[in-house]
Image (spheres, grey):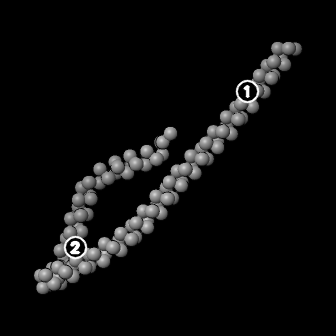
Amino acid sequence: MGIIDALDETSSAAVEKGEAYVRATKKYYQLKLFQQLAIISTMGTKYAIFGVLGTLGLIFISVAGALALSVYFDNAAIGFMLVGVFFILMLGIAYGNRKRIEKKVIRKLSENYFDS
């Protein structure tokens, strides 16, 4: 009977340790999920605020630049067209560098997600 009692105690201890491991792992993944959600939420909020304010600033600067060019060239259409062409060129540059931008975004996300 001594061997059976020892096996029973050992198996009970193994079950308890296994359950403790599962609880600890569950808590770890909950904390990891919370960390990732917090990072995404704060980054999204910051980028939304910066994006809205930057867009408003860019709109005012663009209109002011177009009006200044209109006065310089004495033609409103030319001033606004030059500002439009400038933004089309910027779009082309961004489109041409889209792979580099994607790599930087993926690298930054992987640093946040796979940190130890």
Number of the label disc, if any, that sits on residue 14: 1
Does residue 105 lie above or below 17 as drawn? below
The amino acid at mark 2 is Gly
In percent of width and height, residue 25 lies at 63, 39
Number of the label disc, if any, that sits on residue 84: 2
Residue drawn at x 76%, y 24% is 11
Residue drawn at x 67%, y 34% is 21
Q: Are marks 2 and 1 in contact (CB under 8 Å)?
A: no
SS at circle 1: helix
Query: 39 or 102: nearer the eye?
Result: 39
Sequence order check, earlier mark of 2 and 1: 1
SS at circle 2: helix
Does residue 47 lie above or below 111 as drawn? below
Q: How would you rate the neighbour count of disc 1 (Cα within 10 Å): few for under 14, some for 14-19, many for 20 or more?
A: few
On the picture, is 99 further left or further right than 71?
right
The amino acid at mark 1 is Ala
- Gap between marks 2 and 1 measured at Cα: 71 Å
Residue drawn at x 52%, y 50% is 36
Can the viewer see residue 77 in this picture?
Answer: no
In percent of width and height, residue 43 lies at 46, 58
In percent of width and height, residue 23 lies at 68, 39
On the picture, is 25 further left or further right than 59?
right
